[in-house]
Amino acid sequence: MSARPVHRLADWAARGHSPWGGQPRALRPIALAIWLAFIVFPVVDAITNSDPPPADHALAIAASLAFVVAYAWFVALLFRRDQRAVRAGLIAVIFALAVTLTLADQPTWAFLFSYASGCAAVGLPSRLRFLGVLGCTALAAGCALLAGGSGGQAFGDGAAAVGVGLLMVLLSDLRERNMELSEARAQLAQAAVARERERFARDLHDLLGHSLSVIAIKAELAGRMLPDHPERASAEVADVEAVARQALREVRDAVSGYRRPTLDSELEGAVVALTAAGIDASVQRARAQLDPEVEAVLAWAVREGATNVIRHSRARSCQVRITAGVGEAAVEVVDDGDHEHEPVPVPVPVPGAGLAPRPPAPPGHGLAGLAERAQRLSGSIEAGRRLECAGFRLAVSVPTAPPRP
């Protein structure tokens, strides 16, 4: 998975805090206007009502306009996390205006509690929403009765308040669950990208570590041979070019996602590299048809084992054994050197003469990557000094039938 979908998921989760966050800016006023269309009814009722005296009529119009402004302001700030205190104040104003208009003017204003209930359902913290809706319902019925309304009217206003409030509570909870799901998906996508980067870095390390070790050995060998054996030095330089081109192809394959090493190619490369380092290499291989994933892990084991022998020992010989049974396939790389993970070998162009140490170098991370590959197929890895004699042993075994996801 690439990083681009991760950013899209993160942006989508962030836009979940706004009802129109995913829409163009030009459409946001339209979304607000839809909300305003539902709230103009209180103003229309106040203007068209001719029963109260002019002064009371003007106050009712002013209060209803204030209610419209408070409600529209609340909707505009509804999903802004940095405006929670302002939203709480607006909810209080909306409740106060609904109570004032109902008790001071006429009981028909009790329908405003439906708006107030919706505001409480979406504006209060989740633990207080249900209580806010119940309180608003009680206020709607109680204020309607106190203002002189009938029992049926009080029941209708209370039912409207509780219905709208509970519906908005459900919608608010659903929105929050969707936001949490989106954020979780974004985090999973980011984790997948991180794992993919680690895998790619590990593959590049394993690919280039082996190839560059061979190039360094052959280049130094060519330098030693150049004064006295220019023909052999020329052959080594040609090998350096071939290895470099092969490494470039492998890196391109890895970048394209199609790189899967094979035992034949890795065994051939290991023998060439070990021989160039002055190490006597022998291979014992059981011929068997292996699952491509199993063969890839075994091929990586051969590559890593040969690279470790070349870089971290003064071995004179190295044996690579490949076995394949009914339920398990394994690779074993054994040498007679002294692995300290500090000395790095220098090639000596005399077969069997061994390797002289270079200045200390830090250990690599190839064994850790190899262990991860083996574990993905429920395999195992053993790496350590040989107890019976000098040398180092690397053994990797995996089931011949790897588990499928």
Image (cartoon, rainbow, N blue to C red):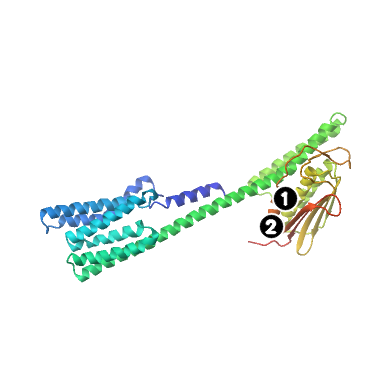
Within-10-Å neighbours for mark 1: few <14, some 14–19, many 20+ = many
> Taking 73 as reference, is 287 left or right?
right
- C-alpha gap between disc 2 and disc 1: 12 Å
**Residue placed furthest toward the bottom:** 151
Q: Identify the mark nearer the N-term, 2 or 1.
A: 1
Task: Name which residue type carries label 1.
Answer: Leu
The residue lying toward the viewer, choosing from 89 and 297, is 89
Camera sees residue 153:
yes
In percent of the image, x 58 and y 49: which residue is there? 193
Image spot of residue 2 (x, y percent): 56, 48
Image spot of residue 148 (x, y percent): 17, 66
Q: Secondary structure at mark 1?
A: helix
Q: Dividing the picture into quarters, in which one does residue 91 lie?
A: bottom left
The residue lying toward the viewer, choosing from 140 and 35, is 140
Q: Secondary structure at mark 2?
A: helix
According to the picture, the residue beneath numbered tag 2 turns out to be 375
